[in-house]
Amino acid sequence: MTFTIIGPEIEARLDWIALTEALEAGHSLPRAVVADTFLTRRMDGLLTRSAWIDGMGLAVKAASVFPGNPKKGLASVNGAVNLFSDADGTLEALVDFTVVTKWKTAGDSLLAASKLARKSSERFLIVGAGAVAESMIEAYSTIFPKARFRIWARNAESARAFADKTGATPETDLEAAVLKADVIATATMSNEPLIKGAWLQPGTHLDLIGAYKADMREADSDCYRRARVFVDARATTLHHIGDMMVPLKEGAITEADVTEFYDLPSGKFSRSSDDEITLCKNGGGAHLDLMTARYILSVAQSI
């Protein structure tokens, strides 16, 4: 049996717009079946995220999480995406974990913004100064060529360093920065809401990327009351992530109010007016890892 091994060198040949097209096409196929597992040994862990899409194949994204590794000069997270044939289940590729995660995460929110943000959007606010935030500047710039970026982070020094590296303008007042933004992307590990619904202006698009657990939130419930609400997948967000669980519990929204990527073929996943406030929660399920890995393999095979 032969299979392809794909490492970080493939990034130079990847394209953000082509990825969003691949993600959109993936949602015209039958709905994915997904499952996650997490094994632990004291402080260490093994996370596996699996997906199966009829017509696309199977993927298992496995990552070891060893918090003590940095003291040894090693990365704390290591892994790969195992991509299997839809026809016979044979292994087709091993794709670098970091590459898939970066492109899946940013591509997810880029697809949402391409449908929900106003085409004239220029003022982009990034909240959080980590690797995902940097990827979002790279991704947004491909679809919004006039985008001008501002950065806010709890740690002002981190914001300044991010600004020096990316060319973004640092902000110290989050409320003031939100008030003048067309698109806001949050990429934090916050357990308490950072974005207030009262700050959102007509026509704003809010991309919530960072929170991924039940006790994590980046936006308050007023954001949901004022916005039309979207997610990448209902199955991996509504009852798993605090940013969706709390507004649902409080009655700010109902499950029927939420539109997902699987509504793309019908045209429902779209902005209805220039004044509408849109909010999309990026849950990043394993099915998106499968779609992204499949896109990456297609690029590798074309070389």
Image (cartoon, rainbow, N blue to C red):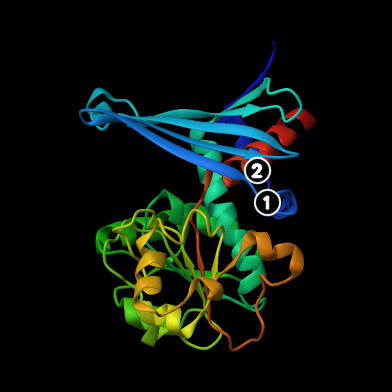
Residue at 54% across / 76% down in the picture? 257
SS at badge 2: helix
User: For mark 2, does the 10 Å Cα neighbourhood hold few (<14), some (14 to 19), or many (20 or more) residues?
Assistant: many
How far apart are the two marked residues, 1 and 2, measured between alpha carbons? 6 Å
Whether residue 300 sits left or right of residue 96 in the image: it is right
Q: Are marks 1 and 2 in contact (CB under 8 Å)?
A: yes
Q: Is residue 85 above or below residue 245?
A: above
Residue at 35% across / 80% down in the picture? 196
Measuring from the top left, give residue 293's x and y in whole percent. Answer: 63, 37
Q: In front here: 94 or 171? A: 94
Quadrant of the image occupied by residue 217: bottom left
* Amino acid at the residue labelled 1: Leu
Q: In front here: 46 or 13? A: 46
Which quadrant holds the C terminus?
A: top right
Q: In front here: 50 or 9? A: 50
* Amino acid at the residue labelled 2: Met
Quadrant of the image occupied by residue 143: bottom right
Whether residue 236 sits left or right of residue 221 in the image: it is right
Q: Is residue 267 above or below residue 9?
A: below
Residue that numbered label 2 is attached to: 291
Residue at 33% across / 81% down in the picture? 175
Residue that numbered label 1 is attached to: 23
Q: Is residue 98 above or below residue 112?
A: above
Measuring from the top left, give residue 45's x and y in whole percent. Answer: 31, 30
Which quadrant holds the N terminus?
A: top right
Measuring from the top left, give residue 167's x and y in whole percent. Answer: 46, 61
Residue at 66% across / 50% down in the picture? 31
User: For mark 1, does the 10 Å Cα neighbourhood hold few (<14), some (14 to 19), or many (20 or more) residues?
Assistant: many
SS at badge 1: helix
